[in-house]
Image (spheres, rainbow, N blue to C red):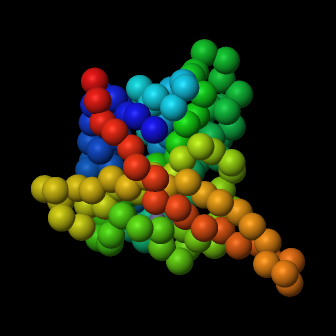
Amino acid sequence: MRITTHAYELAMSHCAAAMPHEGCGVFLGRHEVIDDFQPLRNVSHQPRYSFTVDPEEWIRLIYAKDVAPILGLLHSHPHSAALPSDTDRQLYWPDLPSYWIASFRHPHQPKLSCFRIERSFTSAGEASVQFQPSPYVIDT
Ligand SMILES: [Zn+2]
């Protein structure tokens, strides 16, 4: 996965501005190249510790005709590492090529991690979700 500096900066500045709340949005692009970021409203009742994408904005986005495909979902962790939290692991996520977490634990050195979600079922028939770290490249 590649991400342009433009999209990277849009995403990180949105999340920085959302502090101390979690920020969220989607990365847009084509052919494994992310070149845009669309912020989405976090309508969680506990926005400092979780995020819920505004369902109206989400629906509008997925049916929009003039928008590039969604390549990834991003949210930020204002105070914790760029790793999926227990809550993140329990939520259902739509099938998207990538899942991004931006950590602002060190606000002057934010960290962005990319994961791919792999779903499987245990022998007991329970769904299990694995977040596999996925490398990415930032370029122009
Ligand atoms: Zn999270």
Along the line of sight, the residue nearer the viewer: 98 or 26: 98
92 over 2 or under it: above or below = below
Residue at the (45%, 38%) spot, across then down: 1
97 over 99 or under it: above or below = above
Q: Is residue 28 visible?
A: no
Indicate the position of residue 45 as horizontal and vertical percent values. Answer: 52, 66
Residue at the (67%, 18%) spot, across then down: 65
Q: Is residue 57 left or right of residue 63?
A: left
65 over 101 or under it: above or below = above
Along the line of sight, the residue nearer the viewer: 87 or 48: 87
Q: Residue furthest top?
A: 66
Along the line of sight, the residue nearer the viewer: 135 or 30: 135
Q: Residue furthest bottom?
A: 124
Q: Residue furthest left?
A: 108
Q: Is residue 126 left or right of residue 43?
A: right
Q: Is residue 80 left or right of residue 114?
A: left
Q: Is residue 73 left or right of residue 81?
A: right
Residue at the (52%, 61%) spot, across then down: 132
Q: Quadrant of residue 61?
A: top right
Indicate the position of residue 62 as horizontal and vertical percent values. Answer: 67, 33
30 over 52 or under it: above or below = above
Q: Is residue 105 visible?
A: yes
Indicate the position of residue 34 as horizontal and vertical percent values. Answer: 44, 31
**Quadrant (top left/top right/bottom left/bottom right) for the C terminus:** top left
Indicate the position of residue 40 as horizontal and vertical percent values. Answer: 49, 42
Query: How many numbered dots are placed on residues in this image?
Result: 0
